[in-house]
Amino acid sequence: MRNEDIAEIFNASGRDYESSASELINLSASMLVERLQLSTSDDLVDLGCGSGALISHSEQRLTNGSAIGIDLSRVQLELARERFRLSPLEPRFIQEDASASSLDNRSVDAVGLGLVLPYVERPQQLLKEATRLTRLGGRVAATVIGAPFFGAPGTRLLGLLERRGVAWPEVELQFDPREAVRLALLCDVDGRRLDDVTIEEIEREFWWDSFDEWWRMLRLFGFLPIGRDRVLEGIARDLCVDDRVVDPDGKVRCAVKIWLLSATVSEGDPWV
């Protein structure tokens, strides 16, 4: 996805982005904090920080450390600054491309990538940037939503899109987390690389109180094809009466797979 498109989506989503799936976003952030193994004096960078969920979950650990958030969305960064206006951590927030930041080489101890890899045009470049920024022995961790994105409802949506000849969304509902592992293993920046790469799958059930709330979340996350409103209205009508999507109580329940990638920045050949 082009940088302009990413910024447009999340500028338009505003504070509704996080509120539309707060449990999912907060779970992703808390898992990243655990895998980054933050100590009190660590310096953290959140690439693709949005409104600052990961830094919020890290705040109590970084009592003598620092935090920087980078994002393309001006609106999300404004929300992040507002969120931490009275925080003793005083994180910095910078509007720029997370794949090519202005930060110095080897300037931080930990880099988090929360639900961001499927959005970027060049995922490997983002992982290389994380490697470039991290000191030797530091940690890099990323969360990726597994395929299909939202369980049975997501599968039904993809099937209807395909049968009606609608182009797949710019942000792939079926981003393959194994591709993230392959790309991580190929990272090499000035003799440093991602080593001890591990990936684990965590499955949780999430639900939305109505079909309209679930559909709204898909729009806010940028998962629906832009400019196909008329076709999407028909798909929405079909889905909202489908008992494989909407439960009798009106809720949409989804078993979501979250893949958690973590690695250590090392020097030399990890295979020797």
Image (cartoon, rainbow, N blue to C red):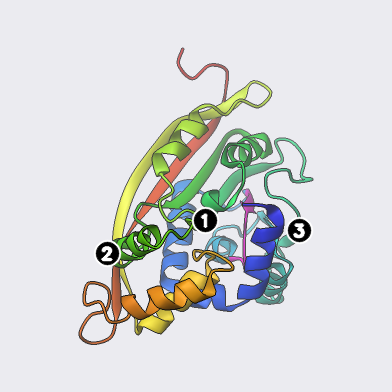
Residue beneath disc 3: 94
Residue beneath disc 2: 152
Nearer the observer: mark 3 or 2; the answer is 2
Measured in 3D between alpha carbons, the distance from the residue under mark 3 to the one under mark 1, in whole angstroms, is: 23 Å
Numbered-mark total: 3
> Which kind of residue does numbered mark 3 sit on?
Ile
Residue at point 55% right, 66% down?
A: 53
- Bin the neighbour count of mark 3 within 10 Å (Cα to Cα): few under 14, some 14-19, many 20 and up: some
- Bin the neighbour count of mark 2 within 10 Å (Cα to Cα): few under 14, some 14-19, many 20 and up: some
Foreground pick, 103 / 181: 181
Residues at discs 2 and 1 in contact (Cβ within 8 Å): no
> Which kind of residue does numbered mark 2 sit on?
Ala
Residue beneath disc 1: 171
On screen, residue 200 above or below 215? above
Of mark 3 and mark 1, the one earlier in the sequence is 3
Question: Of all residues shown, which one is farthest toward the front?
Answer: 164
On screen, residue 251 above or below 69? below
Residue 167, magenta (yes or no): no
Image coordinates of residue 92 in percent, x first then y, are 74, 60
Of mark 3 and mark 2, the one earlier in the sequence is 3
Residue at point 45% right, 78% down?
A: 233
Residue 217 horizontal side relative to residue 85, left or right: left
Of mark 2 and mark 1, the one earlier in the sequence is 2
Residues at discs 3 and 1 in contact (Cβ within 8 Å): no
Residue 106 horizontal side relative to residue 110, left or right: right
Q: Which residues are magenta?
A: 43-52
Nearer the observer: mark 3 or 1; the answer is 1
Image coordinates of residue 148 in percent, x first then y, are 34, 55
Image coordinates of residue 51 in percent, x first then y, are 62, 68
